[in-house]
């Protein structure tokens, strides 16, 4: 006996109400295994795969790439085995299960027309009405089904298309771009291009607009980075987890917030408004990705050693750049570090994230001439720019916090390895 199992868009977070379908990985009639990805979804927080809850066959596909669907919407319907054979016909009838004849499977003729390769991986779909070459290509190159159909229609050779989707998957947009590049140039016309915002860019737009409503001010200070770089080298000589400048900055920022608790306080615009004091210092790290800016959070940075912070940072940054950050990894930050040192920026001003009171912007480290008594020394320096929510942190408190952070970086920090 079989039953129809709808696969729904799950609740991916309290603030998430909808998702955009980036890709559909299966076709009607395909056999799937439990936990096999069916649909790739993008929300304003992350990109995630919706997987098969159990083994079965794809009975119907209710969405297409580009669709925006609400939480709870049916994405795919699977034909799955009844829960137990002992339950008997009455149980199947109670559950609304269709008769055995409703089982979805590929036509036998397709199997004859497209012989299977000598060996296949466990969980791969059986031969279907698609050309045999497509079945052979699948394990070697990830190609969205809609991209295959578009390639056949537009005459695009998938072997020469470079995928820009997650894990190198060839998407519909890659096929269309390849077709456009090989098409004869159209006569030039005065046209304007329109690009729809992704869910991530919409989220960035909303948060930055909300940030503009925060009364903010900025404090800037140049810091002698001699001790900071010496500690980085000392950590490298000890071996173990590689510690970078950002890891040292995160620990020093967390220590500053412990000593100045208003940096770990958020303004909540309720009726009436109130201040939310946070006990755990969870430091967000701004990360630039192909999809836009995301801010994963290093938890309890005030308690962690440098090795733990470095390990968390590497894992979170890797997940961010592949679009695989969970919602939990991007929420609940206390204050944020934003660095453009790798981009060669000397100094810049960052915007406070809504719900936080402080963001630390760090520029690159450069050698400068610095007076030392009656002599001039060449010293590595970096510039800190702290931005504060004036509703929480007054100017004098902000200045004291900046002086505290500078003092820690210039030799006053007892680093926790």
Image (cartoon, rainbow, N blue to C red):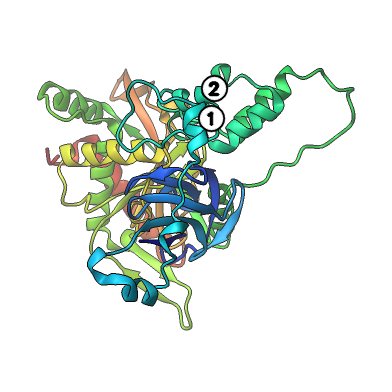
Q: Earlier in the sequence, mark 1 or mark 2?
A: 2
Answer with the quarter of the image where residue 94 lies. bottom left
Q: Is residue 140 visible?
A: yes
Q: Nearer the viewer, residue 155 or 47?
A: 155
- Image quadrant in which the N terminus is located: bottom left
- Secondary structure, mark 1, is loop
> Residue 396: where, in percent of width, then height?
38, 59
Q: Is residue 346 visible?
A: no
Q: Nearer the viewer, residue 399 or 283?
A: 283
Answer with the quarter of the image where residue 273 lies. bottom left
Q: How many marks?
A: 2
Q: Residue at x 82, y 19 (%)?
A: 185
> Residue 29: where, in percent of width, then height?
49, 45
Residue where numbered disc 2 is placed: 162
Q: Residue at x 57, y 53 (%)?
A: 63
- Secondary structure, mark 2, is loop
Q: Residue most toward the bottom?
A: 272
Q: Nearer the viewer, residue 120 or 350?
A: 120
Residue where numbered disc 1 is placed: 170
Residue 3 as seen in the image, left or right of residue 225? right
> Residue 196: where, in percent of width, then height?
67, 46
Badge 2 crowding class, 10 Å Cα cut-off, few under 14, some 14 to 19, many 20 or more, is some
Q: Are marks 1 and 2 in contact (CB under 8 Å)?
A: yes
- Image quadrant in which the C terminus is located: top left
> Residue 217: where, in percent of width, then height?
50, 54
Badge 1 crowding class, 10 Å Cα cut-off, few under 14, some 14 to 19, many 20 or more, is many
Residue 154 as seen in the image, left or right of residue 211? right
Residue 385 as seen in the image, left or right of residue 174? left
Q: What distance separates the C-alpha of mark 1 from that of mark 2?
A: 7 Å
Above or below, comparing residue 183 to residue 107 in the picture = above
Residue 150, disc: none
Q: Residue at x 16, y 47 (%)?
A: 304
């Amino acid at each position: 006996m079989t039953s129809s199992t709808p696969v729904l868009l799950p609740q991916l977070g309290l603030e998430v109400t909808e998702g955009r379908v980036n890709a559909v990985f299966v076709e009607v009639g395909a056999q799937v295994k439990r936990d096999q990805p069916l649909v790739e979804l993008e929300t304003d927080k992350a990109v995630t795969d919706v997987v098969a809850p159990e083994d079965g066959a794809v009975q119907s596909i209710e969405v297409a790439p580009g669709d925006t669907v609400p939480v709870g919407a049916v994405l795919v319907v699977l034909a799955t085995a009844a829960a137990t054979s002992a339950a008997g016909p009455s149980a199947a009838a109670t559950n609304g299960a269709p008769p055995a004849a409703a089982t979805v499977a590929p036509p036998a003729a397709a199997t004859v027309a497209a012989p299977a390769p000598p060996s296949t991986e466990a969980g791969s779909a059986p031969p279907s009405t698609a050309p045999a070459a497509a079945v052979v290509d699948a394990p070697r190159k990830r190609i969205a089904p809609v991209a295959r159909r578009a390639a056949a229609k537009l005459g695009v050779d998938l072997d020469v298309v470079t995928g820009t989707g997650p894990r190198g998957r060839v998407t519909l947009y890659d096929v269309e771009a390849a077709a456009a590049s090989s098409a004869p140039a159209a006569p030039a016309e005065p046209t304007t291009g329109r690009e729809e915002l992704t869910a991530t860019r919409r989220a960035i737009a909303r948060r930055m607009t909300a940030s503009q409503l925060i009364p903010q001010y900025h404090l800037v200070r140049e810091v002698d980075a001699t001790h900071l770089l010496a500690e980085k080298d000392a950590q490298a000589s000890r071996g173990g987890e590689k510690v970078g400048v950002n890891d040292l900055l995160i620990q020093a920022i967390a220590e500053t917030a412990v000593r100045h608790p208003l940096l770990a306080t958020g303004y909540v615009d309720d009726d009436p408004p109130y201040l939310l004091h946070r006990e755990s210092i969870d430091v967000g790290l701004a990360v630039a990705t192909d999809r836009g800016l995301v801010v994963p959070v290093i938890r309890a940075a005030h308690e962690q050693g440098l090795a733990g912070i470095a390990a968390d940072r590497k894992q979170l940054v890797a997940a961010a750049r592949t679009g695989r950050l969970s919602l939990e990894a991007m929420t609940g930050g206390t204050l944020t570090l934003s660095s453009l040192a790798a981009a060669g920026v000397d100094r810049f001003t960052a915007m406070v994230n809504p719900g936080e009171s402080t963001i630390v912007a760090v520029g690159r480290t450069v050698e400068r001439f610095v007076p030392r008594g009656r002599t001039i020394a060449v010293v590595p320096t970096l510039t800190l720019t702290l931005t504060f929510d004036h509703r929480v942190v007054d100017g004098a408190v902000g200045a004291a916090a900046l002086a505290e952070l500078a003092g820690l970086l210039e030799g006053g920090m007892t680093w926790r390895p």
